[in-house]
Amino acid sequence: MKILVTVKRVPDPNATIRVKPDGTGIVTDNLKFVVNPFDEIAIEEALRIKEKGGGAEVVLVSIGAKVAQEQLRTGLAMGADRAILVVAEQELDPLGVARILAKLVEQEKPDLVLMGKQAIDDDANQTGQMLAALLQWPQATFASKKESLESEAEKSGLPGIQLSNGTVTVVREVDGGLETLRMPIPAVVTVDLRLNIPRYASLPGIMKARKKELKEIPVADLGVDVTPKLKVLRLDPPPKRKAGRKVSSVQELVHLLHTEAKVI
Ligand code: AMP
């Protein structure tokens, strides 16, 4: 059993993002980058499947600048076995990434590809679906946990992703509830927030990660057309919130809501 987990380097979701004055991108000086939080959940899930037995190999893959080594090392320190970095310094769109991943899947032949449901930098939520389509593999998006069950025993017996006898069963979040799907493997599964809480890398894990294999492949070596099909025209920060105003009485508040805000 081999599980390929995708890992994107993204800005820290807790950092303050500043848009460049000309709207062509965000200011990256002094910006902290992390593993995309949904991808951390995917790594955690792969490690849990591995630890349950069956001897799964967990292989991480990232596509992007050389600095993404940092995020792959974080995943290796969590417990993944090895990592692949497809070095691409140019801008890529989700279709380009999906095409590269499809090529790697051809080479690595994993039984399962686990991905985040979306990357928090541009919230595209497209790559997993495109990869499944390119491979013509079944897919389940937004894997979650069966939290609606009453008893703890039932809950612990039903993780969001279960592999058995050549199939994968996935509990997924849909509007209004949960849906359970079963499909044959190989398959693509994208994970949502409530699936698990990712572990922190331990100190021994960090030490071991330094010696684990991190293979770099220049994107040109894969022979994949990654010309972007979409272009980001501009970015605009959200409008600044106006300062609040203090009123001295409820009467004044009601009066202003009526005459100025015109909401009552
Ligand atoms: P997106 O479609 O861009 O929202 O991304 C969905 C998922 O695809 C992410 O959570 C990652 O697991 C994966 N992904 C997207 N871009 C990359 C990348 N450059 N390198 C590795 N994984 C990626």
Image (cartoon, helix red, strand yellow):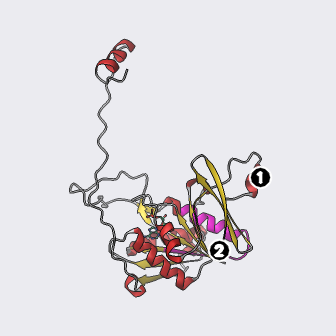
Q: Position of residue 98 (x, y in %)?
A: 45, 73
Q: Is residue 258 above or below residue 177?
A: above
**Of 134 and 161, the residue lying toward us:** 134
Look at label 2 and name its amino acid: Ile
Residue 113 lies left or right of residue 85; in this view the side is: right
Q: What residue range appears in magenta?
A: 40-61
Query: First in sequence: mark 2 or mark 1?
Result: 1
Circle 2 SS class? loop
Mark 2 vs mark 1, foreground winner is: 2
Q: Position of residue 53 (x, y in %)?
A: 73, 72
Image quadrant in which the N terminus is located: bottom right
Queried whether the magenta region covers residue 2, the answer comes back as no
Cα–Cα gap, marks 2 and 1: 25 Å
- Is the residue indicated by label 1 positioned so its CB lies within 8 Å of ligand 1? no
Q: Which mark is residue 154?
A: 1
Res. 206 in view: no
Q: Which mark is residue 185?
A: 2
Q: Is residue 102 above or below residue 117?
A: below
Q: Quadrant of residue 263?
A: top left
Residue 1 lies left or right of residue 257; in this view the side is: right
Residue 154 lies left or right of residue 199; in this view the side is: right
Q: Position of residue 147 (x, y in %)?
A: 68, 49
Queried whether the magenta region covers residue 58, the answer comes back as yes
Residue found 43% across the figure and 51% down from its top = 14
Residue found 64% across the figure and 68% down from its top = 47
Look at label 1 and name its amino acid: Glu
Image quadrant in which the C terminus is located: top left
